[in-house]
Amino acid sequence: MRNMSFALTTEQVRAGAKTVTRRMGWMFLKPGNLVRPVVKSQGLKRGEKVEVIRAPLRIISVRREALVDLLIDEAYGRRECALEGFGDDPVLCRPRDFIEFFCRTHACGPGDLVTRIEFEYTDGGGG
C-alpha cells in the first residue's frame, strides 16, 4: 500500500474533516485503491520513522482540473475548500486564498492542472 503524505493537513485528516486532496501527479490512482495517510514520507532524517495518521483511505474518484476552476464557480470553490478540510478556517475557506496557499506550497500556478482525489475513511471516522 502506498503512503500519501498529509504534512500540510495532518490535523484535518486526523479529525476526519478532509475528504478531498489535490496533488501534482498521482494520476495512477483508481477508485477503490487504498492509501496509508502519513504525516511525511519523503525527506525523513536518519532514524525518523513514517508516522501513520489513521487507518487507510479508500479512493472514491480521481480527476484532473485546473485550480482556477475553484474561482469560476464561487459556490463550487467554497464547497471544495470545505472538502479540503478548511471549511472553518477564516482564510483558507476562501477559494482565492486556498489557491494562493496551494500554489505557494506546490510551486505551481492557478491555471495548472492538478489531480483532485476524493477519498473516504475506512475506520468510519470521516466528517
Image (tube, rainbow, N blue to C red):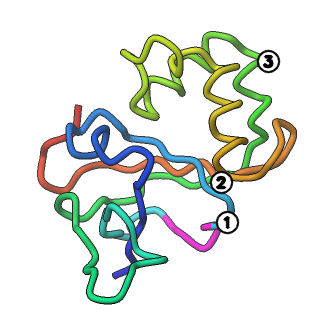
Res 80 → quadrant = top right
The residue singled out by tag 2 in the image is 115
Find the distance from the CA under tag 3 to the CA under tag 2: 18 Å
Q: Residues within 10 Å of mark 3 (few under 14, many from 20)?
A: few
Circle 2 Cα neighbour tier, 10 Å, few/some/many (<14 / 14–19 / ≥20) = many
Tag 3 and tag 2, C-beta contact below 8 Å: no
Residue at the limit of the structure toward the bottom, as seen here: 46
Q: Considering the numbered disc 2 on the image, is that residue within a helix, a strand or a loop?
A: strand
The answer to which of 98 and 57 lies nearer the viewer is 98
Please state if 15 lies on the left or on the right of 103 as rendered: left
Residue 33, quarter of picture: bottom left
Which of the two discs, 1 and 3, labels the residue nearer the N terminus?
1
Q: Three-letter amino acid code at disc 3?
A: Ile
- Contact flag, marks 1 and 2 (Cβ < 8 Å): yes
* Pick the front one: 102 or 37: 102
Q: Quadrant of the N terminus?
A: bottom left
Q: Secondary structure at mark 3?
A: helix
Please say if 21 is above or below 96.
Answer: below
Residue drawn at the location 64% of the way across and 20% of the way down: 95
Look at 23% across and 39% down and name the residue there: 16
- Is residue 84 positioned above or below 25 on the image? above
**Residue 94 place in picture, x, y as percent:** 59, 15
Q: Earlier in the sequence, mark 1 or mark 2?
A: 1
CA gap, disc 1 and disc 2: 6 Å
Looking at the rendered structure, the kind of residue marked 2 is Thr
Magenta region's main secondary structure? loop
| Residue 29 among magenta residues | yes
Please report the bounds of the magenta region as a residue range.
26-30
Q: Position of residue 17 (x, y in %)?
A: 29, 33
Q: Residues under labels 1 and 3: Cα distance?
A: 23 Å
Residue 25, numbered circle: 1
Residue placed under numbered mark 3 in the picture: 72
